[in-house]
Amino acid sequence: MNSLTIVVCSLLYLGLLFGIAFWAERRERTLVARQKQSLLNNPYIYALSLAVYCTAWTFYGSVGQAATQGINFLSVYIGPTLAAPLWWIVLRKIIRICKIHRITSIADFISARYGKNRGLGILVTVICVAGIIPYISIQLKATAVSFALLSGQSSATHAPSFLTDQAFYMTLLLGAFTILFGTRKLEATERHEGLVTAIAFESLVKLIAFLSVGLYVTFGLFDGPGDIFERASQQPALQASLTFGPGHSSADWFWYTLLSIPAILFLPRQFQVAVVENVEERHLNKAMWLFPLYLFLITLFVLPVAFGGKLWFGNTGLDADGYVLSLPLMTGQKGLALLAYIGGLSAATSMIIVETTALSVMISNNVVMPWLVSRPAWQLKLGNQSSRFVVYTRRLAILTLLLISYGYYRDVSDRFSLVSVGMISFAAVAQFSPAIIGGICWKNGAQAGARLGLIVGTAIWFYTLIVPTLIPVLLPESLLTDGPFGLSFLKPQALFGLNSLTPIAHSVFWSLFFNVGCYVWGSINRPQTALDHNQAILFVDVFQFNRPSENTAIWKGKVSVDALRKLLITFFGPEQSQQTLERFARRNRLIDRQSYADPGLVTFTETMLAGAIGTASARILVSSIAKEDPITVDEIIRILKTSQELMTVNKELERKSNELQQLTQQLSETNERLKQMDQQKDEFLSTITHEIRTPITSIRALTEILHDNDDVDTATRQQFLGTVIKESERLTRLINQVLDLERFESGRMRLHLEPLLLRDVIKDAVEATAQLASEKYVTVQFLANCPPTPVVADRDRLMQVLINLLSNAIKFCEPEKGHIIVRLIVEGATCKVSVCDNGAGIDPALHSLIFEKFYQVQGDHRKPKGSGLGLAITKKIIELHNGSIDVDSQPGHGSVFTFQLPLSTG
């Protein structure tokens, strides 16, 4: 493929990233103004940003490793997957600590935990820079190699001059992008909206690209994964790759898996996206399964591509790291090859951008700024330009890191595989594990132990892994074969005579062994300072403190509010500083014009500064303007105990307040129900009065006619008397219903239980309502596809239930078109009776209300002619029989009332 085309595509892709980042930044400013949710407040964006873990090592190196070592490549993905369920415990605790203390980097975290020690911050920063530069260099190597393969060069030989090397210009472009979107804000704790959005996008691109290549190789070049593995099984070398053979033992698998667990949390770029850029702790819930799913998908086709490359190219000597590009390229799929190149570019650039951003913050906050703020002369020179100086320092650090990485790539890393260099960096960050895990779990972990463990562990890592890479460029080969000064037990890759492990496993074993040992020994034998003890409690018991920066302020001395205000103005400007102090004053009920600051304000100011210049620098600055008195461990314990007691009281008050709120809500709901019941009762009384008045009026009118007119003929007299009897019966039924309801409510209703056949009761009820049905020309059908159904029940009450249901069904069916079906079904130990009609139907929202004792369906089309007590009484009768009743109905589609009763077991 033409080199110019590749360059143009690369520039267009980087331009797209610029566009996405700019759009996200502008969108953030708009949403902040409108107080709406940002892109980063999204668990899917958060989970995708974590995929910055998958670098060019994953995209190219995993295939190369799988081609030579088989399933060993999976170890660095199994580790994070196994660790993911623990994130809610470990990572959430780290996130909470960093948010409270405004911690911006891994160096800041360790420095803040161990007494805000400046020396520890510098040490961690140096370790990170030394450990990550090789890692950045292999990303540059991957882009250079992929460019060479795609442009048709046989190998990625270096250009004679860096001015003609495309990797150099890629380095400068990435530097410009990182500077633009990684150092726009002074406060490193503020979210990098544009940068993280672009990283999430790149995570999608590299996943799509790798899956595309995997699908093409698996189903395009071969006949599915079965075909590939069947062919591979016929070649002894590839067959051996699927087991733990001599070249790749289970020990390597264990050590690689072990190294990947701290790497997913403590690599500077992972700490940046997982902790610093985290918006909500609850996003971890989705990330804990989304991120392992991402790892599964991006490694799904690694073995098919690796074995496919081996089968396709044979022993041509082609570097297996390049199979992802070579396979589509050599088979004429130039578009797919270009997509693969863009995917690899995404994997490399995302890592470089986030890694250098994180390292630049560490350099400025833990190396440059502590040195600067400890010199008053420099502070005077900078004045209010301090914030600008911090930003420029970070930008210079980014450019310097990238140029050093480029130099390392040209001189050192080009001689090693992507995986081997990547594991060196993993081993470096593993040295932070004892200090961090011990720091958040063990209150006795001390500054001396952390420093000693880091120094010894890192020294062994450097000696056993970095020194061999400098041979023979800078050091003689005899160092590797004979040891320094001929001392064979000090050979870098066989330290103390241990020569049975691979170089990575050997280094990790000895470095972590001495690191952990020195950490524990130093912590036990060197007592903690007062500040050490304070920070230990705040970190280990972080979930017990609401806002430690204010409520558990451990400070004793004297400093004016005005001095603190001026200090904040130096870095944040007058407007933001004033707003920050006013918020603090309102939250803590402090008088704005008080002359001396209380300990809470001093600690708050230091925490605010820590977000911009790091904990160590903030500590130095506050100490430079404050007259601080020494504070003892006993005083710290007393203050923390008082603070915990206050928080316990606050939690109890909050609990009581919540209980009171719940009770208030319950009372409000009860009052609302009482109002509804009162309204229903009024409607019920109105209906009852009307129902009683109607028959009485009819009876009185007819009897008055008969009384006043002796000449009424016999036929008319008989008709009037018949009407009087019917109205009297109607009045009797109404009174009986009211009395029945009263007996049900008082619990005085007694059933006359007897064995009976439900079929016979239903037939009698159908016959009893036959006249009413015939008057409206409604057909009633009884279906019983079951043997005789014995139940123990009150026959009269069941008749009352059935007649009520049938009467309602007849009443609400349209004359001459109505059809009612009564079904009897036996299911297990219960029998079901359903009354189905094709009447007007009932709104589902009213289904639970129609059985209420004071409720009547509103609307003329369903307005009953009776009292509305029938269904309430029906439900009571069924429930007294240990049964249940429900309704299934839709307006315009009829109704189905179903009740079920237990069968007789006699």
Image: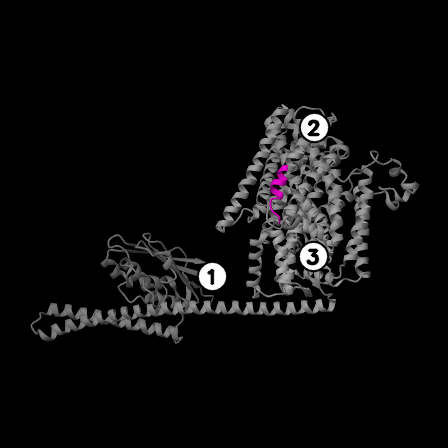
> Local crowd at mark 2 within 10 Å, few (<14), some, or many (≥20)?
few
The three-letter amino acid code for the residue at tag 1 is Ala
The reply to whether dot 3 and dot 2 touch (C-beta < 8 Å) is: no
Quadrant of the drawing holding the N terminus: top right
Residue at position x 62%, y 69% in the image: 646
Query: Distance from label 1 to label 3 (Cα)?
Result: 77 Å
Relative to 506, 731 lies left or right:
left
The three-letter amino acid code for the residue at tag 3 is Arg
List the single residue furthest toward the right.
486
Q: Which residue is mark 2?
A: 163
Q: Which residue is mark 3?
A: 619
Say if the magenta span includes residue 635: no
List the single residue furthest toward the left.
711
Asked which colour scheme the image uses, the reply is one colour
The three-letter amino acid code for the residue at tag 2 is Leu
Frontmost of labels 3 and 2 is: 3
Give residue 606's position: percent from left, percent from top.
65, 57
Which stretch did the figure color magenta? 176-186
> Local crowd at mark 3 within 10 Å, few (<14), some, or many (≥20)?
many
**Chain-order first, disc 1 or disc 3:** 3
Give residue 813's position: percent from left, percent from top.
28, 56
Give residue 539's position: percent from left, percent from top.
68, 59
Q: Which residue is mark 1?
A: 829
**Chain-order first, disc 2 or disc 1:** 2
Say if the magenta span includes residue 182: yes
- Relative to 25, does residue 853 appear above or below in the rendering? below
